[in-house]
Image: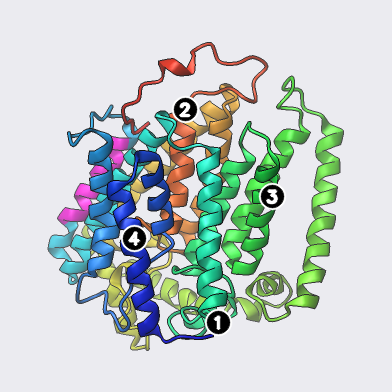
Amino acid sequence: MSVSLDEVYVVELLLFSVLAFGIILLPPRWSLLCLLLAGCVEVVPPGFDASASVSLGNAIGRLLLPILLLLRFTGFRLPKIRWSFLSVIWCALTAYAAVATLWSPFKLSGLKMAAYLSSWFVLYLVFDIGWRRRWLDQELIMAALWGSLTLAFFQTVVLGNPLFNGNRAGDFASAQFSPFTGPQSFGPFLACLLTLLLFSDQKSVLRSLSIGACLLALIEVGSRYALIEAGVVTLIWSLLVAAGVRTKGRVQLKSVLALLVLAVIALISFRAVVAWIAPESRVNQLFEIADDPDVAVAGTFGWRLLIYDRVLTALSYRSPQELAFGSGTSSGGEIPQELDTDNADLDPNRNIHDEFLRAEYEWGLIGLGLGICMILATTGKLWVKALRLRSLNGFAALAIMPGILLALLIENPLAGPGTAESLGYLLVLSYGFALQQRVFAEREIRKPSAQLQPGPSTA
């Protein structure tokens, strides 16, 4: 069975409407589940021009619903935020992005970007409250996993994969498993759910089945950098277990070396099986990049290399003032227009597939400095929680940080709050900061969980 994009749009509207009403009306625990599933249903009208208009579905899903959910959780009062260095830096970046819209050639897209950054902050507060009040737990994570897999089965098998079979996604024709959002968004979402399931102190048969299903789905989705994220997370978790951190904290060198040998053998075997079963898959292309450099410059990757070269060339001709302040929020939309390609009408917030290059181009050294400070401070705090406090939550969030860094280097996650990818990252980061449990330590933390404040915190 295969349907048209117009018919899929009607299905998307119906599903999103049901989930939106669930976010607004259901009890907090189930409203959070609806929020996670809504991230897997992006309502994009056929032929929508993101550079010239605002999508009502995106405005509702990415900004309005998170605000309503936060107000529900706080009794329709402004949340009491315990300000920290991280929250101040993020708000400063958001404010500067809004101000930098004044000298941008794409003012509508610039305002949308400022709203996106604000939405990230609101969504973090929502998940922080969810973890602290125990509405979010392993059972809800598994429910989100199986619910998203059901949506992916419905879109891929029942509807015939009309969204990502050369119609809307073009290069994703080989990605055979995804819900109503792109594989590059669904893949990281699965990697984040896998992280939460691995770094959990609760053991059950359903958890083991969920981990297996998540790994299988990641292969079927075909997102190459999501597979790298999942691989890094799994390796870190395996090394922690093999090193004996769960017991007395003593490193067992033989176990670590044996695990690394097994990992190499498993990778080689996986490479051979994928090349034999699905030689045209994007997963196989990931391995072929190392064998044939020409593979790396084909398709979307070649387009990105062209964009990177143009951005670096433009930066090399800028004055010190332009390097400091940038050319304005969303001004990266100029690059495809100057190249005069078929991608000239893309969303200006999604043209430079590198958030660091984009920050320097649009916000200058000010924006780039704020972003780097944010990453370094976040990593430092998680390092302390994981390595010094032996917090299981800290280990989970620290394990996903390489994946977040990779996403910042090759994608535009900042322009997608409320999508499956962003919800996954925020889910793990809020898990890392919100709770205080020493599962990997020799003894439990003395502060009882009952002393945890239910109010929001920006860590």
**Of callouts 3 and 1, which one flags the residue occurring earlier in the amino acid sequence?**
1
User: Which region shows up in magenta?
Assistant: 87-99
**Of callouts 4 and 3, which one flags the residue occurring earlier in the amino acid sequence?**
4
Q: Which one is in front, 172 or 109?
A: 172
**Amino acid type of the residue tagged 3 in the rendering:** Leu
Marks 2 and 1 sit apart, C-alpha to C-alpha, by 41 Å
Label 2 with label 1: CB-CB less than 8 Å: no
Marks 4 and 3 sit apart, C-alpha to C-alpha, by 28 Å
| 45 lies above or below 65 | below
Query: Is residue 88 on the magenta stretch?
Result: yes
Q: Which residue is mark 1?
A: 173
Magenta span dominant secondary structure: helix
Is 108 left or right of 275, judged from the image as shown? left
Residue 46's disc is: none
**Amino acid type of the residue tagged 4 in the rendering:** Val
- Secondary structure under badge 3? helix
Residue 435's disc is: 2
Q: Which residue is mark 4?
A: 18
**Amino acid type of the residue tagged 2 in the rendering:** Leu
Q: Which one is in front, 459 or 159?
A: 159
Neighbourhood count class around disc 4 (C-alpha, 10 Å): few under 14, some 14–19, many 20 upward: few
**Of callouts 1 and 4, which one flags the residue occurring earlier in the amino acid sequence?**
4
Q: Residue 340, image x and y in percent?
A: 33, 88
Say which residue appears at 55% left-offset and 53% top-offset.
Answer: 145
Q: Quadrant of the N terminus?
A: bottom right
Q: What colouring does the structure picture have? A: rainbow
Label 1 with label 4: CB-CB less than 8 Å: no
Q: Nearer the viewer, mark 3 or mark 1?
A: 3
**Amino acid type of the residue tagged 1 in the rendering:** Ala
Q: Which one is in front, 29 or 127?
A: 29
Q: Nearer the viewer, mark 4 or mark 3?
A: 4
